[in-house]
Image (cartoon, helix red, strand yellow):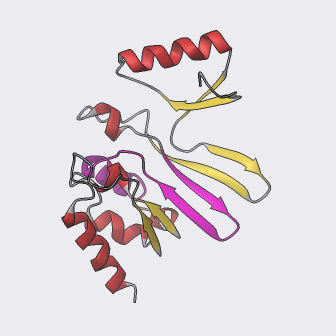
């Protein structure tokens, strides 16, 4: 935001602060950037046939374990019949909460593409969650030889299992 012109920032309610978050808010104020605070159930229209549904966080049901990760914004992008589920850094506790919250409308989680949560960390991507999303493609944002060892081999195996189920 210091280098680029930003018209609007989309965030969720924060229940924990940090030095970086305070710096972020300061830049927003200094540059008078519009802020849109979102939570589950909201729809963000971009243009005709292109929009996001906000899946998570649930402001009435915050997760206090690893607060920043488990209350990450989870968005589902729709473009005609194509969709991507962006899962932020949620972990299995949030994945289970999402499955429970949408238990009567699990088809809402089905997505063409899944951005795998938390860089493929061992704390995310439980098989039950992957089975409900049923992605054709899974993307993992991770650097080669990173210090965290991401993606985790178990996550890769779960994705492989999913691929074999969908063949």
In the rendered image, residue 133, in percent from the top left (x then y), is placed at 43, 67
In the displayed image of the protein, which residue is found farthest to the right?
48
| Residue drawn where x is 43% and y is 56% of the image | 102
Which quarter of the figure has residue 64?
top left
Q: Depth check: give the residue in front, 76 or 29.
A: 29
Taking 10 as reference, is 74 above or below it? below
Q: Depth check: give the residue in front, 54 or 30.
A: 30
Residue interval drawn in magenta: 74-102
Q: Is residue 139 left or right of residue 84?
A: left
Quarter of the image for the C terminus: give it.
bottom left
In the rendered image, residue 80, in percent from the top left (x then y), is placed at 70, 67
Q: Is residue 85 left or right of residue 42?
A: left
152 is within the stretch colored magenta: no
80 is within the stretch colored magenta: yes
In the rendered image, residue 21, in percent from the top left (x then y), is placed at 43, 20
| Residue drawn where x is 30% and y is 77% of the image | 160
In the rendered image, residue 49, in percent from the top left (x then y), is placed at 75, 60
| Residue drawn where x is 25% and y is 64% of the image | 155
Q: Is residue 33 left or right of residue 108?
A: right
Q: Depth check: give the residue in front, 30 or 37.
A: 30
The count of marks equals 0
Taking 54 as reference, is 62 above or below it? above
Taking 122 as reference, is 163 above or below it? below
Quarter of the image for the N terminus: give it.
top right
| Residue drawn where x is 34% and y is 55% of the image | 100
In the displayed image of the protein, which residue is found farthest to the bottom?
167
């Amino acid at each position: 935001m210091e280098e680029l012109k930003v018209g609007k920032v989309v965030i969720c309610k924060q229940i924990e602060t940090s030095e970086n978050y305070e710096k972020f808010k300061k830049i927003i104020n200094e540059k008078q950037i519009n802020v849109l605070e979102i939570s589950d159930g909201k729809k963000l229209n971009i243009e005709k046939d292109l929009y996001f549904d906000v899946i998570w966080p649930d402001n009435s049901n915050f997760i206090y374990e690893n607060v920043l990760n488990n209350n990450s914004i989870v968005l589902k992008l729709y473009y005609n019949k194509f969709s991507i589920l962006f899962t932020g850094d949620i972990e299995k506790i949030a994945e289970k909460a999402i499955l429970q919250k949408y238990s009567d409308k699990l088809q809402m989680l089905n997505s063409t593409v899944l951005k795998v949560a938390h860089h493929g960390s061992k704390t995310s991507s439980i098989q039950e969650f992957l089975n409900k999303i049923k992605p054709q493609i899974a993307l993992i944002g991770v650097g080669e030889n990173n210090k965290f060892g991401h993606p985790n081999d178990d996550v890769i195996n779960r994705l492989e299992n999913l691929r074999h189920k969908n063949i």
